[in-house]
Image: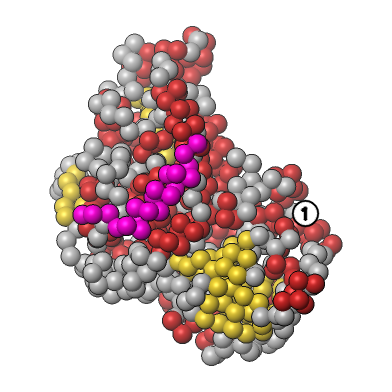
Amino acid sequence: MTLHPTVDAVTRRIRERSGPTRSAYLQQIDQAARRTRGPDRMGCANVAHAFAGVPSDDRFRIVAEKAPNIGIVTAYNDMLSAHAPFQHYPDLIKTEARRLGATAQVAGGVPAMCDGVTQGTEGMELSLFSRDVIAMATAVALSHDMFDATLMLGVCDKIVPGLLIGALQFGHLPTVFVPAGPMTSGLSNGDKAKVREQAAQGLVGRDALLEAEIKAYHGEGTCTFYGTANSNQMLLEAMGLHVPGTAFVNPGQTLRAELTREATRTVLDITRARRYAPIGQVVDERCIVNAMVALLATGGSTNHLIHWVAVARAAGIVIDWDDFSALSDVVPLLTRVYPNGSADVNQFQAAGGPGFVIRELLDAGLMHEDVLTVRSAGLREYTRIPVAAADGTTLSWQDSGESGDLNVVRPASQPFSATGGLKLLKGPLGRSVIKVSAVPEDRHVVQAPARVFDSQEGLQAAFKAGELDRDVVCIVRWQGPRANGMPELHKLTPPLAVLQGKGYKVALVTDGRMSGASGKVPAAIHVSPEALAGGPLAKVQDGDIVRIDAVAGTLEVLVDAAEWAARPLAQMSPELQAANAAGCGRELFTGMRRHALTAEEGACTWL
């Protein structure tokens, strides 16, 4: 299939833009790859320290037999339902590695916080910072330099991007990502959202709300909506960094355990066959474009317009929101998964899952097929679905076939929408993005008076006081990377959804983030430059007419040009500055904030 001209043009543009940085990166990993392996190169004391804690048979394999040694980086903790299954993965991996005459060691662990726990709290202001902490922790774990390959155990929002960024610092090593899968379906996402909206209106109490939340989030695995965590898994499939079809298999299944063993076999196959497929070569310009296309085709999380910019930079590749926008104009929307529909990821998997979507995109010429992956058969292998034999120890793959439910996933010839789920907005208020895949078409354009807030708590208080029962564009500023770490503002979704449900024209404009779970309320997010950096959001006043137009791709304030030019920038209040500096250890990060990049640059803090 001939590559779509826009996909080709965007890839060429990225390659040209990235020439110097990508060349420097490839030179760096080539030099690392040419070195003698760590256990043979390093001093005897270094080697002895590295292997003092492993069984003697493993020491013999590594030193005498020069067997491959796999470094495991794990995001295990039992605070996160998605990461709790990882507790026993290292033992499973080590057993499989030994069976194959190799070894494995847990190189290190990385922190993994849950945005679902910290939403609306001070802890949420450390969420985006945690991505870069995870990246650094990954690099620290691998800095022992005793490994021939790596396995990355992680699933959720900042964890996968952080692991990717860290792993790419050791881009000469073959690397496979190992997920744990989604929890089984509980209370539907739609029913959960209804109870949240009722609670926002005071129609139900805390007991009813807590009961609904517990029924929705009820066991091990990722949340079942198609937010940032599950978008991560779709993107890793499209990048060829998983065992094919491993993203959405539930924890506890026999197939899940066998796929983890297969990840061990896969990374060892690369090292033993001397097939040159280190992660730094797998993640090239075509691979990054494939990830962007997969995100757009599935209506994935807006968070990845920040995260994947940072991931790409870690591999010497420079992408921007204009690239996403150009691809979104030609990539069809092929899935309806909550919040872009009523189905959850388990229903998505049953209807065909990532394999179906990747096949449709490849056949339509919307993805690069001539890419390197962790599997020798290339990206076409990711169009197939894994099946475990009755004995639970043998894997096979079958064709994804036709859609199992056209309400959930459709072929490229019959999409839900001819364009992708994300739109770039530009105008006097700056550059921002909007997720349109879940927004009703009659809400793609909203024009209304502004109500300006300096915090999400201020908006919630105004809602409870009945001050927002009208057409309104809510401006929530001082929420960018430099201001307070760019927290997600998902707690604003229920009150805004209530207002929209009453028939009002409602929208949100913010320099902060919204969760990948946010949907039906129009939200112009990641506004750049942010207010604290002198961005135009600092000029908006109550009553200004603001227009969000996702059709034309504009974000405007309808104020006389001369008046707008003369209007001074508002300043963050001393009280808010004090609040941003207090509590939750945030004062430790003030130095890093001075180095924060813009949202469009990936919002990195210090990497």
Q: Is residue 550 magenta?
A: no
Q: Residue 134: image x %, image y %?
A: 55, 42
Using the image as rendered, state which of residue 450 and residue 512 is in the foreground.
450
Residue, x 21% and y 41% (percent of image)?
377
Q: Quadrant of the N terminus?
A: bottom left
Residue, x 49% and y 82% (percent of image)?
443
Q: Quadrant of the C terminus?
A: top right
Position above or below: 236 against 377: below
Q: Is residue 17 magenta?
A: yes
Q: Residue 186: image x %, image y %?
A: 38, 68
The image quadrant that residue 197 belongs to is: bottom right
Quick one: which residue is furthest to the right in this view? Answer: 574
Residue, x 44% and y 31% (percent of image)?
26
Q: Residue 90: image x %, image y %?
A: 39, 36
> Along the horizontal axis of the image, is 236 left or right of 506?
left
| Residue bearing the label numbered 1 | 581
Residue 334 appears in the picture as rendered: yes
Quick one: which residue is furthest to the front in this view? Answer: 562
Task: Specify the principal SS of the magenta part.
Answer: helix
Residue, x 48% and y 56% (percent of image)?
304
| Residues rendered magenta in the picture | 1-20
Quick one: which residue is furthest to the top in this view? Answer: 44
Using the image as rendered, state which of residue 558 and residue 96 is in the foreground.
558
Using the image as rendered, state which of residue 343 and residue 572 is in the foreground.
572
Q: Amino acid at mark 1?
A: Ala
What coloring was used for the rendering?
A: secondary structure
Residue 91 appears in the picture as rendered: no
> Along the horizontal axis of the image, is 545 left or right of 572?
left
Position above or below: 25 against 539: above
Q: Residue 342: image x %, image y %?
A: 37, 74
